[in-house]
Image (tube, coloured by chain):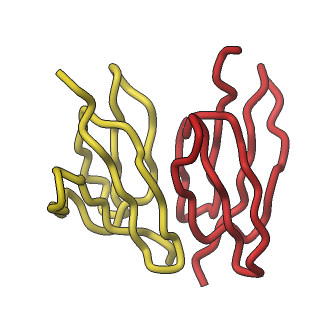
Chain colours: A yellow, B red
């Protein structure tokens, strides 16, 4: 399985927001994450970068 | 390995732009894709959506 962990970058910190993410879909100026267990989470952020072989997705908060 | 194929969405078409993508990094208002063979490609686009279990990344061109 090729799911990944999603992190949000806040300054020089990275906070884990969801594990085992399968799909990421645009929604309401952010993204809806759905993991392999069917759990959903909305993040008000842009996708900053991806490191797929490391199973990591990085989001960055959009300015308010 | 959990690399993915990157597609660019253009209307109702999807064009394959790179296979075996490992990392995606922000660069110059777009993204630099690097695959597991070390090949690089720049896309002037935003990340539209991800389907990781299906090994697919979707980009969408930014308006000129």
In x, y percent, where is residue B8? 74, 39
Residue positioned most to the bottom: B1
Q: Is A30 in front, or is B63?
A: B63
Residue drawn where x is 24% and y is 38% of the image: A61
Instruction: Note whether A13 is above or below B30 in the view shown.
Output: below
Rendered image quadrant of residue A15: bottom left
Residue B46 drawn above or below residue B51: above
Q: Which residue lies most toward the top here?
A: B64
Q: Name above or below for residue B27 compared with residue B19.
A: above
Find residue B33 and report its horizontal and vertical position in percent: 66, 59
Instruction: For the C terminus of chain A, give its image quadrant.
Output: top left
Is residue A38 toward the left or the right of residue B43 in the image?
Answer: left
Front-most of B5 and A39?
B5
> Which residue does the image show at 36% across and 60% down from the upper left?
A21
Q: Quadrant of residue A3?
A: bottom left
Is residue B15 shown left or right of residue A41?
A: right
Residue B36 x, y percent position in the rendering? 70, 79
As drawn, which residue projects farthest toward the front? Answer: B28
Residue at 71% over, 53% down: B6
Residue nearer the viewer, B25 or A57 = B25
Q: Say how many tags the image has.
A: 0
Percent x, y of residue B53: 54, 65
Say if B1 sits above or below A5 in the image: below
Horizontal placement of A19 versus B52: left or right?
Answer: left
């Amino acid at each position: 399985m090729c799911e990944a962990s999603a992190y949000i970058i806040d300054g020089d910190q990275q906070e884990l927001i969801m594990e085992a993410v399968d799909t990421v879909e645009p929604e309401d100026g952010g993204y809806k994450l759905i993991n392999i267990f069917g759990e959903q989470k909305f993040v008000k952020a842009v996708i900053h970068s991806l490191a797929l072989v490391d199973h990591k997705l990085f989001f960055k908060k959009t300015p308010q």
